[in-house]
Image: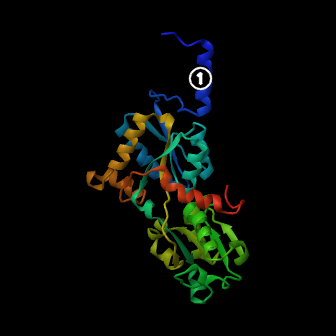
């Protein structure tokens, strides 16, 4: 059999690079780095992530290290720039990471609740009692009744705190920047939204239902629920191919195997993530979120 020429080999290598074949994997990597989008209290997030890192280190036989991120974009860019190996992202940033990864980033797992996620619109108690805001079954009922009201989203890159609430407002014929007296983006994500509404700094806000449901009861009393959105797909664990197929499979196996019946360590991780369980998922399940992201007017997302 004739051996291929040097020129032929060079051409094959160039074609492989153009196709974007899988990046080189380093099975001997001594550390797996992960991060979590900072969508609420960063101190609590760090505690939860440290607990998960300890469990994964023990189960995978390799050091798993939490790398805190300043914002959502840092998580996506860190994965693409080989500063992170796997990350916990929202629905919109899951799509961002898959797209930026150009075929090398894929969904690892999601929570049971993320396949049927939703957002809450909440209002300040005093504004509700005064009749300035109202509980509704359809957001369209607010159309023409928002003059003078102050509204806040969560982080600009948040699926449940911004992308989907904006989408549902637009579907109801409410253009936020035109309908409300002011539109902001809360510092501190979902916790910032709840606190701003409860304190009366704004009249209305939108946030993650899971965060609201486990928040302090007195805080929720000062910021009652006004509307619940239809369901959509949201958060996910995503990983880069460079982690290696075997290690990705093991990581997925550990996540999907977490069970409260197995003891306090696993129960604590599931509780920290507000999950009944982690379940398998496919990249294409986030296509509807990508369509919403790509359909919004330019300038509202980073």
In this view, 217 is above or below 49? below
Residue extending farthest to the front is: 1
Most foreground residue, 249 or 52: 249
Q: Residues within 10 Å of mark 1 (few under 14, many from 20)?
A: few
Asked whether, in this view, residue 34 is left or right of residue 132, the answer is: left
Location of residue 291 (image quadrant): bottom right
* Colour mode of the rendering: rainbow
Location of residue 294 (image quadrant): bottom right
Find residue 33 and report its horizontal and vertical position in percent.
50, 39
Most foreground residue, 169 or 157: 169
How many numbered marks appear?
1
Does residue 113 appear in the picture of this structure? yes
Most foreground residue, 26 or 170: 170
Most foreground residue, 54 or 241: 241
Where, quadrant-wise, is the C terminus in this rendering? bottom right
Q: Badge 1 is on which residue?
A: 13
Asked whether, in this view, residue 222 is left or right of residue 179, the answer is: left
Location of residue 277 (image quadrant): bottom left
Find residue 129 and report its horizontal and vertical position in percent.
57, 88
Find residue 25 and report its horizontal and vertical position in percent.
49, 29
Secondary structure at badge 1 equals helix
Residue at horizontal 55 percent and vertical 32 percent from the top:
21
């Amino acid at each position: 059999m004739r051996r291929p020429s040097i020129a032929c080999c060079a051409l094959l290598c160039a074609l492989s690079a153009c196709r974007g074949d899988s990046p080189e994997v380093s099975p001997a990597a001594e550390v797996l780095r992960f991060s979590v989008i900072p969508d609420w209290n960063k101190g609590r997030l760090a505690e939860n992530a440290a607990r998960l890192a300890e469990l994964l280190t023990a189960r995978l036989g390799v050091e798993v290290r939490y790398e805190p991120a300043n914002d959502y974009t840092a998580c996506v860019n860190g994965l693409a720039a080989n500063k992170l190996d796997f990350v916990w992202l929202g629905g919109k940033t899951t799509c961002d990471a898959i797209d930026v990864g150009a075929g090398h980033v894929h969904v690892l797992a999601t929570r049971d609740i993320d396949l049927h996620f939703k957002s809450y619109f909440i209002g300040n108690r005093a504004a509700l009692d005064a009749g300035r805001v109202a509980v509704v079954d359809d957001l369209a009922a607010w159309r023409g009744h928002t003059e003078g009201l102050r509204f806040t989203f969560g982080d600009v890159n948040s699926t449940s705190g911004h992308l989907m609430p904006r989408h549902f407002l637009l579907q109801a014929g409410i253009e936020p920047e035109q309908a409300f007296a002011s539109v902001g983006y809360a510092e501190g994500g979902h916790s910032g939204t709840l606190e701003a509404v409860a304190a009366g700094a704004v009249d209305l806000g939108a946030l993650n239902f899971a965060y609201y449901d486990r928040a302090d009861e007195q805080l929720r009393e000062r910021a009652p629920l006004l509307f619940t959105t239809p369901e959509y797909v949201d958060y996910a664990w995503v990983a880069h191919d460079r982690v290696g197929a075997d290690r990705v499979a093991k990581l997925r196996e550990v996540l999907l195997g977490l069970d409260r019946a197995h003891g306090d360590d696993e129960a604590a991780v599931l509780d920290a993530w507000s999950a009944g369980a982690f379940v398998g998922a496919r990249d294409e399940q986030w296509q509807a979120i990508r369509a919403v992201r790509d359909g919004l007017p330019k300038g509202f997302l980073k």
